[in-house]
Amino acid sequence: MHIETLKVFCDLVDLESFSLAAERNFITQSAVSQQIRTLEEKFKRRLLERIRGRRDVKLTPAGEVFYRESKQVLDAYEHLNESLRGVVGKIGGTVKVATVYSVGLHELPAKVREFMTKFPAAKIDLEYSRTTRVVRDVLNGTVELGVLAFPEPRRGLTITPMPDNLLVLIAPPGHKFASRKKVKVTELDGEEFVHFERDVPTRKAMDKIFKANNVEVKKVAEFDNIETIKRAVEVGFGLAIVPEPAVIEARNAGTVSVIELAEKYWIRSVGVIYRSDRALSLAAKKFVELLSQGNP
């Protein structure tokens, strides 16, 4: 039995998907199934429940024990590799990072390139997901780091702040606000808006500000993806409030107008989260340090 087989099993449980586990390990779905069968034959225990016609990933009692112990083996193996790299002062290995689209697409690429330039033996494995999934993946050990907007304190998690983002108003060309340099929140009352979905932290922050100022906007549409929101504004659906780094290219291209919001509280906090009970790999520590420094 190889250590890679334990990793495939744990990835399958963490991701709850044969296809995603196969993709993560660069093998086929049939290879994932074969490795699970090999484990069950070796230990003479059924590890996963089989339901005819379905491919649900549900552990048997024996599977729960095997998953827990396999995680410890994989952690020990990674610690071994990390210790050996430390002997020669080499920073290497793969750092698994989960992030939300609005941060990952517009703020992390430059940081990943800078990290890879400084530490060519290391690799950043970047995944995009929703906030709730990022937190879950960090807590269950699927990824080592999570990068989020408005990270909330939670038992078992450590938060390292990154530089804040300015939230700005974007409008389609030709809108009455398009030529303005600043707009007050009270001026947004009654305007048509393209929103983030309600469970997105940036949307929650916006709703609190609107409520505090007795402002009601007209919801035209809701999306969980910032690229879709920008596109909707470009074609004239309405206004939107988004983090400034996400619209720099669109502003330069002239596809949307970017207007400053007059009040000082239009700020989006960003941070890196990781488990408090686990020591970060040396590569992860260096990446966190880099992210916390902000842009050069």
Image (cartoon, rainbow, N blue to C red):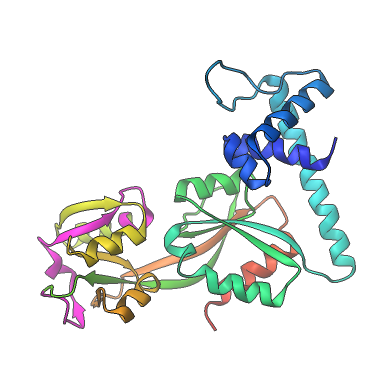
Residue 227 locus on image (x, y percent): 35, 61
One can see residue 266 in this view: yes
> Which residue corresponds to the image point at 57% horizontal and 73% vertical from the top-left?
111
Count up the numbered dots.
0
Magenta run includes residue 179:
yes
Quadrant location, the N terminus: top right
> Which residue corresponds to the image point at 48% horizontal and 59% vertical from the top-left?
148
Residue 39 locus on image (x, y percent): 78, 27
Q: In which quadrant of the rendered view does residue 232 lie?
A: bottom left
Quadrant location, the C terminus: bottom right
Q: Which residues are magenta?
A: 176-203
Residue 89 locus on image (x, y percent): 85, 71
Residue 170 locus on image (x, y percent): 24, 70
Q: Nearer the viewer, residue 262 or 103?
A: 103
Magenta run includes residue 81:
no
Image position of 113 with respect to 227: above or below = below
One can see residue 150 in this view: no
Image position of 183 with respect to 79: above or below = below
228 on left or right of 161: left
